[in-house]
Image (cartoon, helix red, strand yellow):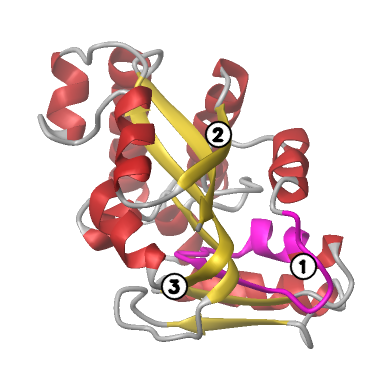
Amino acid sequence: MTDPPQNGHALLDFNSPLSDAKAHDLISGLRLRSGDSVVDYGCGWAELLLRAVGHVPGARGLGVDSDEHAVTRGRANAEARGLASRVALDLADVTTWAAEPADVAISIGASHAWGGTEGTLEAMHARVRPGGVLLLGDAFWERPPGPRSLEIFGEEGFGTLADLVDLALARGYRPLSLTTATADEWDAFESRWCAARELWLLDHPDHPDADEVRRVVDEHRDGWLKGYRGELGFAYLTLARP
């Protein structure tokens, strides 16, 4: 299977439900200064990292992800925006990749790598310098999940928004800000995820992988519309590391 239907991120700006306006607000809340280091664990194609470094002249960025297609896309974007001298992206396992503690660490939608939110918060604590900031993006239940949501994400997958904040407090962080994805952000994210594959199917109706791509996108759309839409939330926490 070629990259476009397999990866499906061609139409997404971010690999999470996030608008341009909210991304700008999140970056502004990081209080980045010239000379600061930003490290994004599970950066994907590093769109938020690139925007953060581009927002502050003199800031430096590192990103790591195990998705070769995404890292290649991110490197090309860094080059195109004149940021290649200040942003480096590595193809590696985020759990074993080593970097100096950062002024700002980012981990959005990558908690599965550390076995969940609690493990992510613990791992990030050593990866942020004292006085630094962690931007954590993670899922939670907006309301009690139905059977289809539990089938997709599992019984022990997420807690409530309050549970998410309590976990951060228990791991020694102090919340600076909290925002959640809106219904419009979710719908745009899911629609674009599906549309990348649907457009590929229109261009490749007789491709040997067409039936499998159609199955994947139909299954995903059903899970979203008949399952977790309105139940699963996504939060962005800006957390100080005392």
Residue topped by disc 3:
127
Is disc 1 placed on a helix, strand or loop? helix
Residue 39 drawn at (x, y percent): 57, 71
Callout count: 3
The N terminus lies in which quarter of the figure? bottom left
- For badge 1, the amino acid type reads Val
Mark 3 Cα shell of 10 Å, populated few (<14), some (14-19), many (≥20)? many
Is disc 2 placed on a helix, strand or loop? helix
Task: Please report the residue visible at 50 percent of the width from the left and 58 percent of the height from the top.
Answer: 242
Q: Is residue 117 left or right of residue 178?
A: left
Residue 97: name its quadrant: bottom left
Q: Answer whether residue 98 is visible to the viewer in this image.
A: yes
Residue topped by disc 1:
53
- Label 1 or label 2, whichever comes before in sequence order: 1
Is disc 3 placed on a helix, strand or loop? loop
Q: Tell me the magenta residue range.
A: 31-52
Mark 2 Cα shell of 10 Å, populated few (<14), some (14-19), many (≥20)? many
- Label 2 or label 3, whichever comes before in sequence order: 3
